[in-house]
Image (spheres, grey):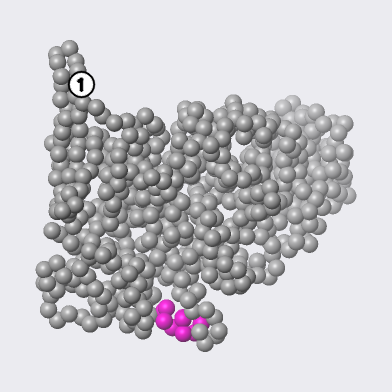
Amino acid sequence: MDLTGIIRRTDFDFRAEYPEISTTIYEISKNSFVIYCATPIDNFEERNDYFEYSIKPMTAPVRLTLVKPDTFLQKIRPIQDDEIAKGFEGISLSESGLFNLLLSKFPDINFDKIQIDRSTGKITVFTIQRIIHDTMGRTHHFLSTVQREKLTAFIHGLKLAQEFDIVDHELTDIAQEYPNYESNPIQFLHAARINKNATYEFSLRDEALWYDNIDRIFSGSFDKNELYFYDRNTYSCYVDFSTFSNIDLRNHLLLYQIVYVTPPFEKDIEKWLAEAKIKKNEFLDLIACGRIRLVLTQPEQRYDIGFIRDAYTARPEAVITRRALATLQQADIVDVSNNYILNDQKLIEMLLPAAMDIAQKQGLDPKFLYEMVLWPIKARRKSFLVLEQKGIFSTSVFGINNAVEKKVSEAYDKDLSFEFTVNSSAIHLASALDATYFPFKSDNGYSDIFYASCMGDFLNFYKSASFSSLGSYMESRQERDNGVVPINPIDIITVNDFISVTELEREIKKYPTFQGGNHLMQTLAPLDKMQRDQKITYYNEQIVKSLNGNKIMAPTLDLGTNLVLDGLGILTGMPFIGSLFSLIKTAGKGLNNSFKSEQFSERIDKALKDNPDRKNIHYLTKINRVARLKDKS
């Protein structure tokens, strides 16, 4: 019986809870272990109680100690942060959990069931002989030698405390649903083929994405850009329609290149689209051209599966299941912790006590400081098992909500732990996607905007808390501390709801709006509310003047360019320069001299390049047919 796996995992779980403590594992006698805490601990009894009753498995023969043993059989190497998932070693698994893991890890093996002998604890894994009737008689398909070797090596690598055996047996009646699985499909990530009648290609694809890459994620050799649905170079947003209604999709399509959408579940999606005045074929066209991607945060069978299949046919990478989202979330957490400026054991041991002492002397909450300093390290160490078994609904187990909810609850004299817990998943998902998150709002006025803003701010900080980007982040924070109001694009721009999404896309293709929208937001973001409202009023006035002044020549005028140039004309005393430029552009093909309209356009664009107002008015005029600035922010 090899117990080193469970002991190593127990030590790791202790360090996940208390990252500032350095430990060493000793086997002091046969199957008897101690974890020596090399870091001084003032409240050792409290930590030891938590270890005994909340961390250590009941059957694990190990204890904590502050005294380094003089004699021992061996020193055992601990699990490092870059090998957390390696071999799934030492993870406590229920019978159903082990069976689910094998089904997911080995999709090419036909499993039947798992049995555990209650008297000896021995585990028997039953695989199935496939029997095919053909013209030559019955053909038996046994577990191949290669399959058996891989399965045996994997189970050995788990380092379970029990012995195991693999039995390949003949079955004439094969069940359509596997036994021994968890009863709650929402809180547990079942293997893609748990129900043989409902195995989807996209589910198998995403399951392989997790199991094929999990070791690479923790070792740091996996980049999020390898995910089939993620591109860090695009403007994207995430909007959740699963529970409450949200803003019209047209707004998101106008401002962002990719819109990640969680559709409603247990509802006909065509009816949902009809409520938004969007036709099914229009929506599928948006999916096919890469503008919309479906984020399935619930089990696949809870959605309108016919529609999901249609979406997958239109564009396979547009259907993203819970396994793929867990892969994204895990990769994001590892990336944040790898780049975290304080992710150094010696630095933490040295810095944390001094920081907490200073905090206490200044009347600050040392426990809050403790959680904030250590969160990226704790999140990395606590995330793997829950993401593996439960997916992104488990985010609150390791999420930023754990670091902030108590402090915020105290500030408002109200227990907000439930609200932070239920809203954690969506906020972390949007952060992992590097996408703007749009809070929902229920019919009774309830919204997650407060929790989204609070957790989002902290997640943005940790993503910037590296040696390369911390300085620029602190500068932006200083601007906000000086009275700058955070900007929500949807609060600024409204899209005409009478226009079809097909017409909207046609307009966007004429003039890609994403860079212009981004520039507009960058211009408005540093302003306080009064300045922002004044700027919006000015922009709207200029748009009205431009559109009214150009109605007669509308068929031949480039309104955006005219608007910019007429603005320049007003400043220079030449109000008709825009109309003159339009005539030059119209006749440009007939010009034979070197002063062609394209060159003229380039010169003017270059001259105006550094004027943010003109660029923004140009952009707003371009999109005027489909959208406009709201009167007030």
The x and y percentages for residue 62 are 22, 70
Q: Secondary structure at mark 1?
A: strand
Magenta span: chief secondary structure: helix
**Going 45% across and 56% down the picture, which residue do you hit?**
395
Q: Residues within 10 Å of mark 1 (few under 14, many from 20)?
A: few
The question of residue 357 being in magenta is answered with yes
Specify the quadrant that holds the N terminus. Answer: bottom left
The amino acid at mark 1 is Ile
**Going 29% across and 67% down the picture, which residue do you hit?**
56
**Going 35% across and 34% down the picture, which residue do you hit?**
195
The x and y percentages for residue 364 are 54, 81
In the rendered image, the vertical position of residue 604 relative to residue 346, given as above or below: above
557 relative to 484 in the view: left or right: right
Identify the residue at the far bottom of this view.
361
Residue 560 in sight from this viewpoint: no
The x and y percentages for residue 107 are 28, 37
The residue beneath circle 1 is 132
1 relative to 41 in the view: left or right: left
Which residue is nearer to you in this view: 390 or 261? 390
**Going 76% across and 36% down the picture, which residue do you hit?**
625
The part of the chain drawn in magenta is: 351-359
